[in-house]
């Protein structure tokens, strides 16, 4: 019979992690609160107007609230966009969340190169063989070179 924990898998060792997130003023839960306040205030005002004889105000208010709901949904869908870069012994993992889309890339850290793209946006590119992944879109442009240098320094022992 096996003794103490030899059947349990050890969690992977993360040597370094960079979490890059979109800069949003409100979390989606706060956004819901703002929308509910719009609905309550607009509902009260349109009810008052309808009570005073302006029956055209409630339908216009409903169209207005529907437009705001669509705009809020589009914003909230991308409010949680993020990128995560993890360095593990011999492995570089890049995960990207964009709306409902989630992508995960794994690279051998000995074969990875980190480059600045030549595009006007100056994103960062991770290249490994024929595979190229663009990341760093949530990092301010003036800080992207520093991030690339930091990742290169962390990858140095694995080359």
Image (cartoon, helix red, strand yellow):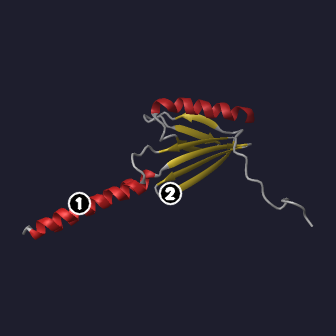
SS for callout 2: strand
Name the foreground residue: 71 vs 117: 71
Label at residue 41: 1
Residue 115: x and y in percent read 57, 34
Q: Residue at x 51, y 40 (%)?
A: 136
Name the foreground residue: 140 vs 118: 140
Is residue 149 depicted above or below 25 in this figure? above
Pointer 2 residue: 101
| Quadrant in which the C terminus is drawn | top right
Q: Give the CA distance from mark 2 to mark 1.
A: 35 Å
User: How crowded is the residue under tag 1: few (<14 C-alpha within 10 Å), some, or many (20+)?
Assistant: few
| Quadrant in which the N terminus is drawn | bottom right
In the image, is 104 to the left or to the right of 42?
Answer: right
Name the foreground residue: 156 vs 139: 139
Label at residue 98: none
Quadrant of the rendered image containing residue 132 = top right
Query: Which one is earlier in the sequence, the residue at label 2 or at label 1?
Result: 1
Q: Residue at x 42, y 55 (%)?
A: 28
Q: Closer to the camera: disc 2 or disc 1?
A: 1
Residue 82: x and y in percent read 51, 48
Residue 114: x and y in percent read 60, 35
- The answer to whether residue 92 shows anywhere in this view is yes
Q: Residue at x 32, y 58 (%)?
A: 35
In the image, is 116 to the left or to the right of 26?
Answer: right
């Amino acid at each position: 019979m096996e003794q103490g924990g030899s059947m349990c898998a050890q969690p992977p060792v993360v040597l370094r992690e960079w979490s890059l997130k979109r800069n949003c003023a409100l979390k989606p839960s706060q956004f819901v609160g703002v929308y509910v306040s719009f609905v309550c205030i607009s509902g009260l005002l349109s009810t008052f107007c309808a009570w005073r004889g302006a029956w055209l105000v409630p339908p216009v208010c409903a169209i207005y609230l529907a437009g705001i709901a669509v705009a809020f949904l589009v914003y909230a869908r991308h409010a949680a966009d993020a990128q995560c870069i993890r360095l593990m012994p011999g492995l570089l993992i890049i995960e990207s969340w964009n709306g409902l889309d989630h992508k995960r890339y794994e690279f051998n850290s000995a074969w990875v190169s980190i480059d600045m793209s030549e595009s006007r946006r100056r994103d960062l590119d991770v290249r490994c063989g024929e595979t190229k992944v663009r990341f760093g879109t949530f990092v301010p442009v003036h800080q992207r070179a520093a991030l690339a240098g930091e990742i290169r320094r962390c990858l140095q022992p694995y080359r």
